Image (spheres, rainbow, N blue to C red):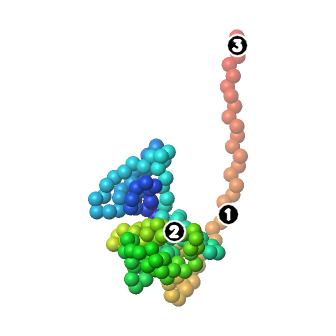
Amino acid sequence: MNLQGIVSVSGKPGLWKALAQNKTGYVLESLDAQKTKLIANLSTAKLAALSEITIFGVDDDIRLTDVLERMKTASNVPDAKADGKALRTFFYEVAPDHDEEKVYSSDIKKVIAWFQILKPLPIFEEADPTQAPAPVAEEPVAETVAAEPEAEPAAPKAKAKKATKKAE
């Protein structure tokens, strides 16, 4: 899942894609059907990159990307407007070690709503460019590398002399 450049803006619903950066903030485009543009001023709006968001866990924080990956394989994802108990039950399936006291129902609704927005997009199926590629099971090929001769250190350059004008 490639979430590079996908952000959440405080006070604005939905998810946004960062298109460009200017002096005062970012130019964003919504991921919904309208493709509305927004200039987010960094002094007034808070941006949160989805690739950097974590969820409170009992022992350690859980990355949002890991939860979304588990939601991909889940059999039935409830609607974001479903009952709080049903959402909590589903969230225990995809993030069993989340901290129940710190993760509110509104947080779960937001994660599920983000999943519904991201699911039909092509970036949802792309590989994350920050992750190392999966190892391919092939026979190792022996490569010979020719040793490059070491470059001789360059001689220090002579300092340029200043021309001085004598007063006559």
| x, y percent for residue 148 | 63, 68
Q: Residue at x 66, y 60 (%)?
A: 151
Classify residue 13 as left or right of residue 143: left
Distance Cα–Cα, label 1 vs label 3: 51 Å
| On screen, residue 62 above or below 16 | below
Of tags 2 and 1, the one toward the viewer is 2
Residue at the spot of label 1: 150
Q: Secondary structure at mark 1?
A: loop
| x, y percent for residue 110 | 44, 67
Q: Residue at x 71, y 46 (%)?
A: 156
Q: Secondary structure at mark 2?
A: loop
Quick check: marks 1 and 3 in contact, CB under 8 Å? no
Question: Reading the chain from its start, which is encountered first: label 1 or label 3?
Answer: 1
The numbered disc on residue 167 is: 3
Question: Reading the chain from its start, which is encountered first: label 3 or label 2?
Answer: 2
Asked if residue 80 shows in the view, the reply is yes
| On screen, residue 100 above or below 50 | below
Q: Nearer the viewer, residue 11 or 65?
A: 11
Q: Amino acid at mark 3?
A: Ala
Of tags 3 and 2, the one toward the viewer is 2
Q: Residue at x 46, y 80 (%)?
A: 90
| On screen, residue 140 above or below 39 | below
Q: Residues within 10 Å of mark 3 (few under 14, many from 20)?
A: few
Quadrant showing the N terminus: bottom left
Classify residue 98 as left or right of residue 36: right
Distance Cα–Cα, label 2 vs label 1: 61 Å
Q: Amino acid at mark 1?
A: Glu
Distance Cα–Cα, label 3 vs label 2: 85 Å
Q: Amino acid at mark 2?
A: Tyr
